[in-house]
Image (cartoon, rainbow, N blue to C red):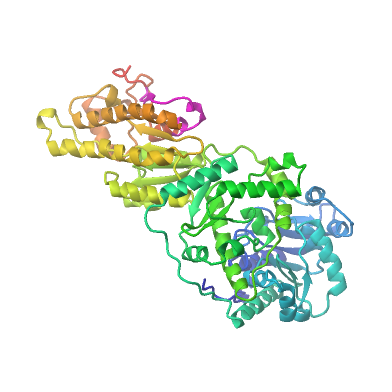
Amino acid sequence: MKQPPIQSLWNAADAAQCNDDLALRVYSSRLLGQNPNLVLHGGGNTSVKISETNLVGEQEEILYVKGSGWDLATIEAPGFAPVRLEPMKKLAKLKSLSDPQMVNELKTQMTLAGAPSPSVETILHAVLPYKFVDHTHADAVVTLTNTADGEQRIRELYGDKVIIVPYVMPGFDLARTIGVQYEREATEQTIGMILLNHGVFSFSDSAEESYERMVELVSMAEQSLMAQEAWEVDQESGSAPEGEQRQAVATLRAEISKAAGRPMLVQMSESEAGYRFAQHPQLESIATRGPVTPDHVLRTKRIPMVGRDVAAYVQGYSDYFSQHAPNAKEEKSMLDPAPRVVVDRELGFCAVGKSASEVGIVSDLYEQTMTCILRAESIGGWQALPANDIFDLEYWDLEQAKLQKGGNLPAFQGEVVLITGAASGIGKACVESFLQRGAAVVGLDINPLIETRVDSPAFLGIAGDIADESTQQAALEQAVRRFGGLDMVVLNAGMFPGGTHIADLKTEDWQQVLRVNLDANLALMRESYPLLRLAPNGGRMVVMGSKNVLAPGAGAAAYSASKAALTQLMRIAAFEWGGDGIRINALHPDAVFDTGIWTEEVLQARATHYGMSVEEYKTRNVLKVEVTSRDVAELSAEMCGPLFAKTTAAQLPVDGGNERVI
């Protein structure tokens, strides 16, 4: 939990490169966004007020405010939504305005139709009479406010430097409250505002001064925590659980997915801080007192679940819902009651989400939350938003509107696939196909390049020999700790030795082919089965067979026999696993030439042998088409999808029509 205190990153030479106020706004926003103790995963927002001439030659004051979906750490000028300032000021004078009405007004007052949606705090930025306004959820500040006597601590620390605003839910009411309070309380000494249980604002007519004021206010909070020996919180060491955890995690994921009504990913954080936090003697009390800021509620949803009793957690959520919204049956259907954070004494903390990127956000935010909680505990006790405010945020009109928009989800969102032989050829193409369909993908290959093959939070590359059972065990353990379980397996890895007739086939060569193509797949099927039977949508497996199963040729005895035996194994598994909702099918590719073993030289040699051009050789099938790795991969993915939901034990050729197979 050692975190460096904030320092100013302002660089006069860099700032001088900015040729207008919007460029300065981008520059200083990025400075704020670079510090995760200020802004994490898109939290916070900034704005600048600029006078512009419109198409009819009139001067207008335009508020450029951070747009939805942009992160301050990487924001560009197009990430700011231009909104006419005067209408925003007039809206702030209204006695009431519903959030849907507010959003409509924000959009109708934009001067650029293609700009992102303005922040819900746009009116708040408008009422502050400064050119530049900065807003963050600085850890140190919210830690101080989220204590039993937080307001008093803030008053003593800042004096008349800030206006202190009691908690109000984000939106119009907060903007109106701040407008009134600023007019009543602002003095020449005021450089910012502290929103209790929410965050901090700084402002100025200078981009540099507004930024430096933010640094000053946050630094004061950090120095206060340091003075109270609450900056670096010591805890008894926590250790990772010993032994295999995949069955426990997969079972937890299955129960969470059932509660959510859809497949969810669950990630063990593997965080030392998480393991320590999970051992805290008052864990259940401190972990369930609420989030750091309202922004965290909207991202991590409700309070964490302590332990693994999903049914009890869901019942508690349902009881609370019934108490606070007994007639809101329609709304209830819009939200699932599943937790997004699980804190368990054995597993540490686990992050839950619909996608790998969402899981990453939840994980990072809760790492931050644990730090804030422990710091606050050391100076009087963590006290965050009460349960009814958390509930109100979850059922906020604007959040419900997002849920209703929804749209079509990727086919495999929230699901996990293991692909063997994933570094090249058909396996590599399978990785791409499943990622495009929204799956979290675990790629296993003997080639160490698999570990860096794909740069995505939804991909885990593991290097190892598929024929080594300890490698398989470790890979499955890694996969489940990273993504929570296993829904699909593509058994693609295999070897194709050089042509050898039976009379010349050595026993060791025969055994080596069977060890890789058959024995390894049997072991992986056996070890995957307990995980696949927990898959929320039913387990699925695709076995990569070969044309040689149906039409073998001379010189390929070991390969043909191994693939035939594997296909027979697939058929038996269909019998044995069908009752568990697991379906398993086989593909029989032929003449897939865009793989590592088919170099240009080899292709040319084979084409010459048959008296053909390379192009003719590639398309020597009934349909006269070339079969690619991509073709096989797409069919592999489809066989795991809804089109084949009622198909098991099928054998499907992917060969363009082979005369011997036909």
**In magenta segment, residue 496:** no
| Residue 214, placed above or below residue 604 | below
Q: In the rendered image, is residue 271 in sight?
A: yes
User: In the shown orientation, is residue 537 left or right of residue 41?
Assistant: left
Locate residue 49, reporting x and y percent: 77, 64
Say which quadrant the C terminus sits in.
top left
94 vs 301, nearest the viewer: 301
Q: Is residue 334 left or right of residue 172?
A: left
Q: Give the number of marks.
A: 0
Q: Residue at x 27, y 36 (%)?
A: 517
Residue 281, percent across and down?
54, 67
Q: Which residues are magenta?
A: 637-656
Q: Is residue 13 left or right of residue 331?
A: left
Q: Quadrant of residue 379?
A: bottom right
Judged from this view, the residue extending furthest toward the bottom is 227
Which x, y percent locates residue 412? 51, 39
Left or right of residue 54, residue 483 in this image = left
Please tell me which residue is depicted at 85% across the width and 74% down the height of the picture.
185
Task: Give residue 655's quadrant in the image.
Answer: top left
| Between 576 and 420, the one nearer to me in the picture | 576
Is any part of residue 454 visible from this angle? no
Residue at 87%, 54% in the rendered image: 96
